[in-house]
Structures are given as structure tokens and as C-alpha cells.
Image (spheres, helix red, strand yellow):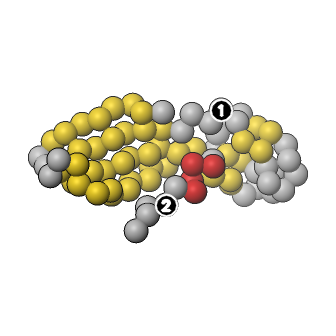
Amino acid sequence: MIESIEREAGTVTLCAHSAVPTARCPGCGVVSGRVHGRYMRRLADAPVGGAVAVIEFRLLQWPRTAAVTEHDSSDRLRPTR
């Protein structure tokens, strides 16, 4: 979900966050809405109108039953080259 778009000093930054309310443990299949933590992915993209384009995506970590954390499906975001 897009939170904001900011333009400053030759950079356009799109700030977004994951809207995934729950995740399924890949080990046992239990669905949980409890969040273990949050972290930020920062991706650079092609220039927009001569300005550097940056995407800041806030993601969630979900607890797993085996005491390991699972990242939401948005963690599969990878920059294309």
C-alpha cells in the first residue's frame, strides 16, 4: 500500500508498506496474524523525469512455530536488471 511519494534534491521516493494481514507457517501450515518484527527494503529504480527513483518498502516478519521467522510474500521483491 502506498503511503507517500516525495521529491527532494533530485530523488523521487515512493514509500509503501505491506498490507498482508496474516501469514501461514511453511512448516506446519498454521495461520498467524501476530507480527514478529518489521524491516525496510530500499530499491533503486530507473530515473523518473531526471530524478533518481527509490522505493522504500516496509515489510513484516511473521513468527514460525519452529522458532524461526518467516517474511511476508512481499519479501520476494527483487530489482530487475
Q: Which residue is mark 1?
A: 21
Q: Quick check: can you spot residue 11?
A: no
Q: Which residue is mark 2?
A: 78
Alpha-carbon distance for marks 1 and 2?
22 Å
Is label 1 or label 2 in front? 2
Given the current orientation, which residue lies at the most extreme left position?
A: 9
Quick one: label 1, few (<14), some, or many (20+) residues within 10 Å? few
Three-letter amino acid code of the residue under disc 1: Pro
**Image quadrant where residue 33 sits:** top right
Question: Of residues 76 and 80, which is closer to you in this image?
Answer: 80
Q: Of the residues under marks 1 and 2, which one precedes in the sequence?
A: 1
Q: Residue at x 38, y 56 (%)?
A: 43
Left/right of residue 26 with respect to residue 22 in the rendered view: right
Q: Residue at x 23, y 54 (%)?
A: 47
Three-letter amino acid code of the residue under disc 2: Arg
Q: Quick check: can you spot residue 62?
A: yes
**Image quadrant where residue 32 sits:** top right
